[in-house]
Image (spheres, rainbow, N blue to C red):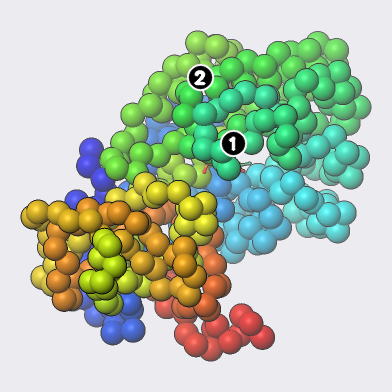
Amino acid sequence: MLSLIQEEAFSSTYKRALTNDLISSEDTSIIFFDTDKLEEKLQYLKTLFPESTHAIAIKSNPLIVNLKTILEYGFSLEAASMEEIELAKAAGAENHQIVFDSPVKTTTEIQLLAEQLKGIHVNANCIEELDRLKILQDHVVGLRINPLVDPGSPDHLSVSRSSSKFGVPISLENEIIQAALDYDNVQCLHVHIGSQIDDLNSLPIALERILDLARIINQRAGFKKIHTIDLGGGFPVNYQLDSVLGMEQLRENILRRTPQLFSEYKTITEFGRFPNAHTSWMVSEIEYELSYTTPKTIMVHLGADSFVREIYSFQEKHRKFILSGKDYSIKKGQETAYQIGGPLCFGGDFLSRNCLLPKVEKADKLVIADVGANTFSLWSRHCSRAFPKVIAYSKDKMEIIKSRESYTDIINFWS
Ligand SMILES: Cc1ncc(COP(=O)(O)O)c(C=O)c1O
């Protein structure tokens, strides 16, 4: 499968938005969100892991329409903060459709969970937290374990080292077992080993270790105290191809190491990047071309405000950039190197330092593929620029689901 932004898809969708009068002159950049693509990914997950509850990570794309579509599909949501729980509720989530993973839950928040949010699945990040969570008698509580495996993720996305702030290291086996036995409401073990996992054996190895723990806890308890395993997320996305290859391999690897997982335990997954990344693309006007830099620089309206993580990590980016001509068709032809400069007053604000594109001309646009996960969801306020308009579309429908921020919105944010 090709990347989401195929020639047809971009040209016809952009022209459709123009025809429907959805784009105005102030829209120097726009986010397009393909709900059919989201459903395709959710269906894929459901087919491959039919036994599991899929709680999609809100942090990777908190647009309410995205969350609503996920819920309407019968999926759940993973919330990393109280605010994300509120987003889930605003999208229509029932309590039992929410998995709460904040690593810094306060006693006030826990009180609220006990009184008003019964039924939410709550994962504890450390043993100390279990003492605070013991008032949750109408909730399944999980304990996050750091399985100490190497997922092969990029450094900043790997959370399974001994220095990780997430989960109790599995080396503290006795403490984990004792805690799981001491607290009645602990009925789940949780892992999330990292994002953009490179080694598809790492999660299966982690699960094997987790199931060993669950077996010991259940044996000592004398009943199936641990009945749920939360596998976390982390499945990688290919930013050059819209490819799902590998997920079958992941299931196969899991079943080889832990054949009993899906039959003996309830399971939860928390994928974020996988279902969301290919659902969206962004388009920006090319405002200027600076011919005196080497290579030449095109100046666009999206930068470190919407690509926070990758731009501030100062590594060359993996994005797929496409040039559209003034008739909205994808430009082809001999390519030359360009820098793609963002709009922010900061020297590192480049989407790329060396991007091969056909010759850029007046009124061309830059299209950025596969931006549905962990891009605009990390929106930064540097230079206080407006969050772009979001247009959602499917085969049958196209509408503005979020207006471009106004000057008043920005003033309100800072007031
Ligand atoms: C606890 C937890 N679960 C799930 C996810 C989603 O991970 P991914 O988007 O890599 O699938 C994250 C991401 O940070 C996470 O911290």
Identified by mark 2, the residue type is Asn
* Label 2: few (<14), some (14–19) or many (≥20) C-alpha neighbours in 10 Å: some
Eyeballing the image, is 400 above or below 209? below
As drawn, is 32 to the left or to the right of 252? left
Rendered location of residue 209, percent (x, y): 67, 16
**Quadrant hosting residue 378:** bottom right
Along the viewing direction, whichever of 80 and 285 lies nearer the viewer:
285
- Quadrant that contains the C terminus: bottom right
| Residue 201 badge | 2
Identified by mark 1, the residue type is Ser
* Label 1: few (<14), some (14–19) or many (≥20) C-alpha neighbours in 10 Å: many
**Quadrant hosting residue 327:** bottom left
As drawn, is 364 to the left or to the right of 150? left
Rendered location of residue 140, percent (x, y): 75, 37
Rendered location of residue 143, percent (x, y): 76, 33
- Quadrant that contains the N terminus: top left
